[in-house]
Image (cartoon, coloured by chain):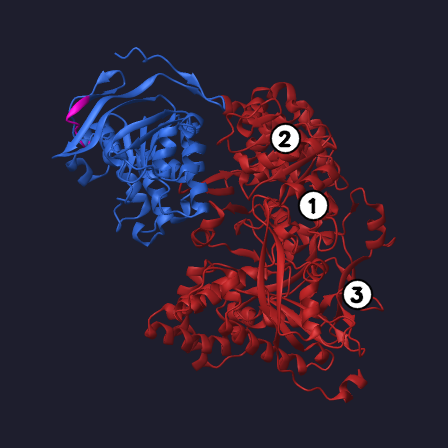
Amino acid sequence: MEAVRSMKTEHLGGTELAQSSQAAGGLQSIPALLHRNATEMADRPAYREKEFGIWQSWTWRETEHQINNLARGLLNLGVKEGDFIAIIGRNRPYMYWSMVAAQSVGAIPVPLYQDAAAEEMAYVLDHCGARFVIAEDQEQVDKVIDIQEDLHQFEHMIYLDPRGMRKYDHTQLHEFSHIQEQGFAARDELTPELERRRSKLDYSSTCVMLYTSGTTGKPKGVVLSNRNVIESAKNSSEFDNLRPDEEILAYLPMAWVGDFIFSVGQAYWCGFCVNCPESAETLNVDLREIGPTYYFAPPRVFETQLTSVMIRMEDASPMKRKMFHYFMEHAKKVGGDILDGNPVGFGDRMKYALGNLMVYGPLKNTLGFSRVRVGYTAGEAIGPEIFAFYRSLGINLKQLYGQTEATVFITAQPDGQVRSDTVGVPSPGVELKIDDNGEVHYRSPGVFEYYYKNEESTKGTKDAEGWVATGDAGFIEKDTGHLRIIDRAKDVGKMADGSLFAPKYVENKLKFFPNVLEAVLFGNGRDKCMAFVNIDLTAVGNWAERNNIAYSSYQELAGHPQVLETIKSHVEEVNKSVAQDEMLSGCQIHRFLVLHKELDADDGEMTRTRKVRRRIVEDKFSDLIDALYGGKDEIYTTTEVTYEDGRKGSISANLTLIDAPVVAVTSGKVAAE
Amino acid sequence: MSDQMTEGYITEDGRKIGGTLMEMKNITLRFGGVKAITDISFDIKEGEIRAIIGPNGAGKSSMLNVISGFYVPQEGEVWYKGAKRPQMKPYQVAQQGIARTFQNIALFEGMSVLDNVMTGRLNHMKTNMFQQAIWKGKAEKEEVENREVVEKIIDFLEIQSIRKTPVGRLPYGLKKRVELARALAVEPHLLLLDEPMAGMNVEEKEDMSRFILDVNDEFGTTIALIEHDMGVVMDLSDRVVVMDYGKKIGDGTPDEVRNNQDVIDAYLGVSHD
């Protein structure tokens, strides 16, 4: 009874709010969109989370109720306008509510990568001066407590999961549900204040602050306004015809701009349902159960899935294996064309339909992609074979090019114009230009406001007219208008003979082999290119199992002569392919080695979004690079590693350096270049 | 009634331990002419983690089997919750709120994790076979209620991803965790763990230790465990009983036990003549 009455008062309060924002010119904040959804789509599901084996769901009305209680609880705790509230945890409805509740009271949510080590969090928490932290569980709380002494502005922490927290000192700690209860109990006193603060929100107020992953140096706090987020969400939703009945699965880090736009921006704009998996391990099952219609993943996820499909097919019975390969061959031939609506013969169509019944359909169902209407991959280049594989199954996978600074969208591929080597045409509202050095610049309503407490970087990135440098080198194809990205502008260099050095281009080719997880190419300013390779433990491990090769660790498998031989054959193929590109034929890999450890974000070798930090790798393994260039055949090396709990150790290994065959390039081409 | 009944104590990390939950009084267990346990007495207090350690063949598992009611000692008495326990069938012991795991995992290999854990709820089910055959109505309601308890345990032990996996397909470390889940499903007052870390690697041991501590902390369950790994025992338990050749040679906090000369001898191996 209590709850019902409170809901009514909220609705009354909300109507006033809606009117005031209408006066300001429409829906200008996420809380305003929340209220619209709670009014117009009250009984539609807004959030689902699998817990205790059941999909629990919340309608938009219930969501508003939850968020309002939390917001009043935050007021009760003393949150002021302009405060930063750090949010640390995996994708859960409560964490999303926390962001919107923070916005509702005029505070700024700052989502953090939950797998970051305590020191990394310390930098961000100190940089934004967060007074409040909302953490998911004991693990995150412990990290913040560890670094608490260095955080001068930190005052209160709210935790969601009370497990193991009973013995903690609760002077600064609060349970999430208690904060909500307090907010509910004090609704009469606090609602006017909540409404006053909410009605002040408009397009120019800050919506969220997201830290860049920091491929180089310290992470930067990107401040995005409501204008950035809502305009971007609106434009992109229209571009892909997103509707209120879309289903998405929220599983990418909440600190990543993509997740914020899909799971908050677009979800609130369109009013569709955000589904949260039960745990990271159950992701695949949850994906299958939900069957998202709109799906988003970095290339790595698609690669991993493809690898696991291929491994499982190799273990399948000969009959099934044959059928799989037979129909996949056919899908490769016509699948993409059918998806793009190009003319395909009747016989081929019939055969594809049969394949759909026997192979593609069941496979899509297993992968959880049966209902995907729009799928995107972004963050890095995706292998053409991988891309083609998914498209040939009839999954509308497209590429997107974006940045935190652009509120994601710079370019995207429209339906029917999908290719693996471009990133599409400018998104609605985005202008593009290429400067003299080949660097891509853009201007759009999504262009970020500024880097927090870093005016210098802001000026260096965004010019007076609002153009932002992407840091990527690329060009626009004349006949199609599609943008093609070559590499990070600062990574593109020149070899000693003056030919172009574009490491990522070559690395990606190498990474497209399932056995290769990661590759790093060196050669800037040198006469030859050398490479480091990380093998994919899943793929190579499976191969080892089937061939009765015993191994006990990554290191041992990585040093196995047969593995090295396989990688060598991959390198050879890549060289052949690279040699065909006139501009880049100088980037063939002359020598390589397979690293004795996987590049890891905990060791600083990668960002949390798993991009290689080239400079750090170059420094850390300089002895190996010298050995490669020095022509040695073997080298002994010791490397420091960081364990998950922050302890440090070291591993050492004898590495074999291998010469790879290269294709001779006629000097005429280089001269012409 | 024992006079120690109401005596509790405060542990080093500030947990309050209650009065005596179970007391073993002068237990002697023989198998034919072999004396497995000779005149052993000790108690287990409410809310504590109590370990029984000793070298191979010291009689630890026999002791646990006496506690669980599987073996009936020839001499001595078992007092539980302030009353002398009569001779009982194991299921009656389970009804009293004692649950256990086994050294050599004893799960139903062909059944899913969920079904295995559900078997732990058997004592909480009241419907008869006929009602369950019809299922609709009472049995259904009962299953939903019990499933809820089981799901909370699955969540607690973080085994959601293997909920539907047949136990036979799981690696050893996870099977041990499933066994713990089944024992917890009984909602026991006293949880007996027979070598919970045997055969595990360091990471699995760390996980298991955390779960044992969490169970004790969250549910207030009293835990008696047998363990080989001295490091684990000393970290986990509040008080330790040390056995050697069927006799008790030490009893006290981990520190006391560690400095006990008899214990050092037993572990380093001194000739017994």
Among the chains pictured, the one given red colouring is A
Separation (CA) of disc 3 from disc 1 = 24 Å
Residue at figure coordinates x 40%, y 71% from the top left: A547
Instruction: Left or right? Give the position of A116 relative to A468.
Output: left
Q: Mark 1 points at which residue?
A: A210
**Is B71 inside the magenta-drawn segment?**
yes
* Precedes in sequence: disc 3 or disc 1: 1
Q: Can marks 2 and 1 be said to lie on one chain? A: yes
* Precedes in sequence: disc 2 or disc 1: 2
Q: Mark 1 lies on which chain?
A: A
Q: What stretch is highlighted in magenta?
A: B70-76
Q: Under tag 3, what secondary structure?
A: strand
Q: Mark 2 points at which residue?
A: A14
Residue A517 location, x and y as percent? 56, 64
Q: Under tag 1, what secondary structure?
A: strand
Instruction: Identify the image quadrant of the C terminus of chain B.
Output: top left
**Is A399 inside the magenta-drawn segment?**
no
Residue B24 position by quadrant: top left
Mark 2 crowdedness (10 Å alpha carbons): few <14, some 14-19, many ≥20: many
* Precedes in sequence: disc 3 or disc 2: 2
Whether residue A98 appears in this view of the structure is yes
Among the chains pictured, the one given blue colouring is B
Q: Which chain carries label 3?
A: A
Q: Name the residue under label 3.
A: A439
